[in-house]
Image (cartoon, helix red, strand yellow):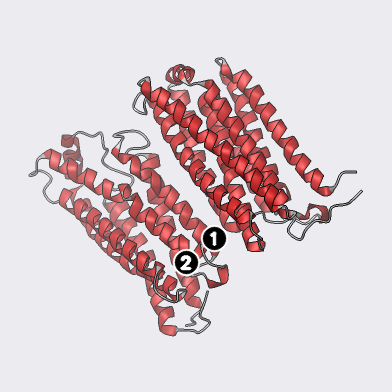
Amino acid sequence: MQTMRATIVNSTTAMWLVLIVATLISGWIGEGGMDRRASSVVLAMAFFKVWIVGIQFMELRSAPRLLCSIFSAWAFATCGALILILLG
Amino acid sequence: MATDVPSALAVEQVHGQRRLPGEMGIWIFVFGDLAVFTLFFVLVAQANVQQNEVFQQSRRMLDFGHGLSNTLLLLTGSWLVALSVEKLRHGRGKQAARGLLLAILCGAGFVINKMVEWSDKIGAGITPATNDFFMLFFVFCAIHLFHVVIGLACLLIMRAKCTRPIGVADLRFIESGAIFWHLVDLLWILLFCLFYLI
Amino acid sequence: MSGVDRDALFGRTLRLCAWSGIASIIFFVIGGVILGRMIPPLLAPNDSADIMVQKISENVMSMRVGSVFQMISFALFAVYGAGIAAQTRRCERSPGFSYIQLMFTACGTLVALLVAFSWALMSFRPGEYEPTVIQYLADYAYFLAVYSVPVFGGWCLMIALPILMVPEAEAPFPRWVGYLNVWAAVLFAPGQMVLFFKSGPFSWNGIVALWLPFVAFFLWILVMCIMMLEAAKRHGN
C-alpha cells in the first residue's frame, strides 16, 4: 500500500522521467536539420516540458488556481507566439 | 502498513486545499524573469526567421553533446531539489541536505560544461562578434549562466538551513529557493531548444 | 513595520518624497521622452558623427528645453531616494542600510544629473563643436544612463536586503517589495553590455540594453512611491 509520501515522490520522479525522455526524443528529432513544421513540433515539446516543470516541480498544480492559470496561459501564449514567428 | 502522517508543513493535496508554494515575492520574480526571457526568445525567433541561413549554419557549429548534457543535468538537478523539499517537509533534514548536495553537483557540472564549451568556441575563433546567432547565443546563455550561479548560491544556503531544525519561515524560504532553481531549469529548456535544436 | 507610534511629520515627509518620485517620472516623460528625444532614441550608436550633428540641429530647441525638464526630474530623485532611506531608518535601531541607501541615492542622482548636463551640452552649439565631440556627448549620456548598473542595481539590492533579512513585521516595506527590487536590479543589468555593441539589441539604443532598463527603472520608481504612500498612511493625516 503506497504511503502519501511515496505517491508524492513517485509523481515527481515520474515527471522527471517524462522530461528526460522528451528531451532525448526532441534531441533526436532536432539534431539533424529541420524544416519549419518540425521546428514547431520541437518547440511545442519544449513548452510541454516547461509546463511540466512548472506544474510538478514548482508545485503549481496545488497552488492557488490564479497562479497556475497565469503560468499555463503564459506557456501557451509564448509557445503560440514563437511558433507563429517561426512559421510566419 | 504504516500510513504516513503528513506533517503540518506538507502539501495539503490530500485535503484538497490549495497552497502557495514559497513566498509571493518569489513568484513576482519568477513571472518577471519569464517576461524578460520571453522578450529574449522572441528576439531569437525573429532573428532565426530573418537570417535563417546564418542560424542554420551556426547551429551546426554548436556541440550538441554539451547542450544535451546540460539539459539533462539541470532536469536532474530540479528533480533532486523537488525531492529534497518533500523530504524536508517530512522532517528528513539529512536526506534533504544530501539531495541538495547532489543538485549542487549537477549545477556545478552545468557551469563547468559551459566553460568548456565556450572556451572551445572562443579558441576556435567564434565569439559574440562572429554573427547575430552567436551574439544572441553568448549573451542570453551568459545571462542564464548568471542565474545558475545565483541558484547555486541559493542551494548552498538552503542546504545549510536543512542541517538545522527549521521553522515555517525557513521552509518557505527554502521552497522559494527551490522555485528559483526550477526557473533556471525551465529557462534552459527553452534556450536549448531555440539555439541547439531549431 | 516597527513603531506603532504615529509620527505625523514623518508621514508628511514620506508623502513629499513619494510625490517627488512621481513628479520625477512626469518631468522625465516631458523632458526625456517627448521633448528630449532620449527615448525612443533619436540618435543611434552607429550613426556617424555628422549624422548625429544633423539630427540634433534639426531638434535643437526641443532638446534644450527637454534637458531643463530632465534636470528637474533627476534632482527630484534625491528626495525620492531619501524617502526610501528614511523609511528604512525607522526599522533600524542604529543606522546601517539607511546610510548605505543614502550613498547610493547620492551616486544615482549625480549620475542622472550628468545625463541632463550632457543632453544640454549636446544641444548647446552642435554646429560649432567637432562632430566627434557631439558623438562623445551622446555616448556619454547613454552610458551614464544604462552603464551605471552597479549604482542603480546596487541601490535596488540595498533596498531589498534590509527587507528580506528580517521578518516581515519588522521590515520597512512588505516582503514582495524586496523581491521586486531584486528583479529590478536584474533588469538593469543588461545595460552593462552597451560597451561591447554598437548596434543591435545590446547597444545603447537597443531593446535589451536601453528599453528594458529604462522601462524597469521608471516602473520601479512608481512602485516604490506607491509603497512610500502606503507607509505614510500609517502615520495618519
**Vertical order, B176 against B52 (above or below):** below
For mark 2, name the chain. Answer: C
Quick check: can you spot residue C198? yes
Residue occupying image coordinates x 58% and y 53%: B160
Q: Earlier in the sequence, mark 2 or mark 1?
A: 1
Do marks 2 and 1 share a chain?
A: yes
Q: Amino acid at mark 2?
A: Ile
Q: Position of residue C145 (x, y in %)?
A: 30, 50
**Neighbour class for label 1 at 10 Å: few (<14), some, many (≥20)?**
many
Depth check: give the residue in front, A64 or B164.
B164
Q: Position of residue A2 (x, y in %)?
A: 87, 44
Q: Amino acid at mark 1?
A: Trp
Q: In the rendered structure, find residue C176 and report the number of the disc placed on it.
A: 1
Residue occupying image coordinates x 65% and y 24%: A24
Report helix, strand or loop for mark 1: helix
Depth check: give the residue in front, B44 or C161.
C161
Left/right of residue C43 with respect to residue A21 in the rendered view: left
Q: Position of residue C55 (x, y in %)?
A: 20, 40
The Cα atoms of the two marked residues, 2 and 1, are separated by 13 Å
Q: Which residue is mark 2?
A: C226
Which is more foreground, mark 2 or mark 1?
1
For mark 1, name the chain. Answer: C
**Neighbour class for label 2 at 10 Å: few (<14), some, many (≥20)?**
some
Q: In the rendered structure, find residue C127 and report the number of the disc placed on it.
A: none
Left/right of residue B162 with respect to residue B127 in the rendered view: right
Q: Position of residue B79 (x, y in %)?
A: 67, 39
- Quadrant (top left/top right/bottom left/bottom right) for the N terminus of chain A: top right
